[in-house]
Image (cartoon, rainbow, N blue to C red):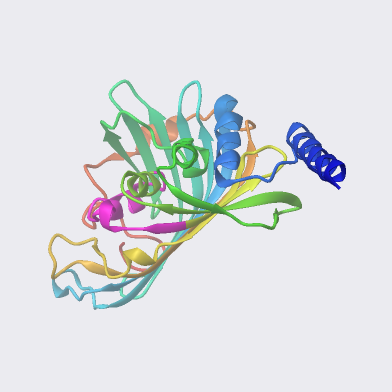
Amino acid sequence: MKKYRKAIILLSTITILMGLLSGCARPTPISVAKNVVEAMKNLKSVDGATEVDLKMTFPSNPAIGINGGDLGMKLNMDVQSILAPKPAIHSSGKLSMSGPIRIETDTESYSVKTDGGYMAYTLLAGKWMKLASNDKKLNMDTLAKKDVYQAIVDKKIKASLDDKLQKVGKKDAYLLRVTLKGEYVKELFSSLGDMAKDISNVLDPDRININMDIYIYKDSSLPAKITANLGDLNDAKIFGKDEKNAAKIKEITLSMTVNSYNKVKPIQIPEEVKKNAIDIDGLNPENIPSGEKGDAL
């Protein structure tokens, strides 16, 4: 009986070793994230889409003719990001608002690296505006950042891995469920553009948990899609100079999907945009022109 027991142990050991050598070991959140970090080393560009859906309660402000009530805001953007050698972003899509402030307009933006920071050009309500920033880092789409995945590897971010593979399009994908806190909350909002960045500036990221689902292509180990419901931001106050006049978030969700990697052509800002852009200090209601549809933003 002893010789059979030894044979069984030996056979089991060989089976396990063969599995490890053939790459059949069960994946873990850390192993998946580590593969993502490695796959991103030669990443030069990303083409994808971002959707932000924001619902809030807006206070009345007779001084500028706004009645209080529920306000909805949706932003749907196609985004092309150049990561190297010279960072640049181009996005285009639609911005729509419903409620006391109503608008539906096409929007487009360019962000390019400069010596002192970066310059952003934004089309809103039919007019181009430009805004210089002294930020040293031009924020890319969160899908293209290694920070989150490296943090999973370093066990700074909580993550779990679904047992079953998911489908993104026709491809198999791992599903990482991640909880973001602190600096990673700030990074998430910064990557979504000026509107979301303004939201993050009035929040305490250390008191916020954001649960995200991140889909990773099995074949390439590159991110495919992110979805998040930012429930912790409910009741946060934004878009106001004081407590009385600020709007209150009721619901905010976002999703990002990658269409392709390393296929984006060089991003050039049209000369007409540079020539006609209005130089502004910030996106305030007084600065922004009225749209062709609806009221002034």
Which percent across, then down, holds residue 119? Answer: 34, 32
User: On the picture, is 102 further left or further right than 212?
Assistant: left
204 relative to 108, above or below: below
Q: What residue is rendered at 29% in x and 52% in y?
A: 200
Q: Residue furthest front?
A: 1
Q: Relative to the observer, which residue lies in front, 105 or 48?
A: 48
Q: Quadrant of residue 95?
A: bottom left
- Is residue 165 visible in the rendered structure shown here? yes
Q: What range of the chain is rendered magenta?
A: 191-211
User: On the picture, is 255 further left or further right than 114?
Assistant: right
Which percent across, then down, holds residue 222? Answer: 62, 39
Q: What residue is rendered at 65% in x and 45% in y?
A: 27
Which percent across, then down, holds residue 117? Answer: 30, 28
User: On the picture, is 104 further left or further right than 290?
Assistant: right
194 relative to 294, above or below: above
Which percent across, then down, holds residue 191? Answer: 41, 44
285 relative to 153, above or below: below
Q: Relative to the observer, which residue lies in front, 254 or 69?
A: 254
Identify the image quadrant of the C terminus: bottom left
Q: What residue is rendered at 73% in x and 50% in y?
A: 172
User: On the picture, is 29 further left or further right than 1?
Assistant: left
- Is residue 293 visible in the rendered structure shown here? no
Magenta span includes 209: yes
Q: What residue is rendered at 24% in x and 58% in y?
A: 285
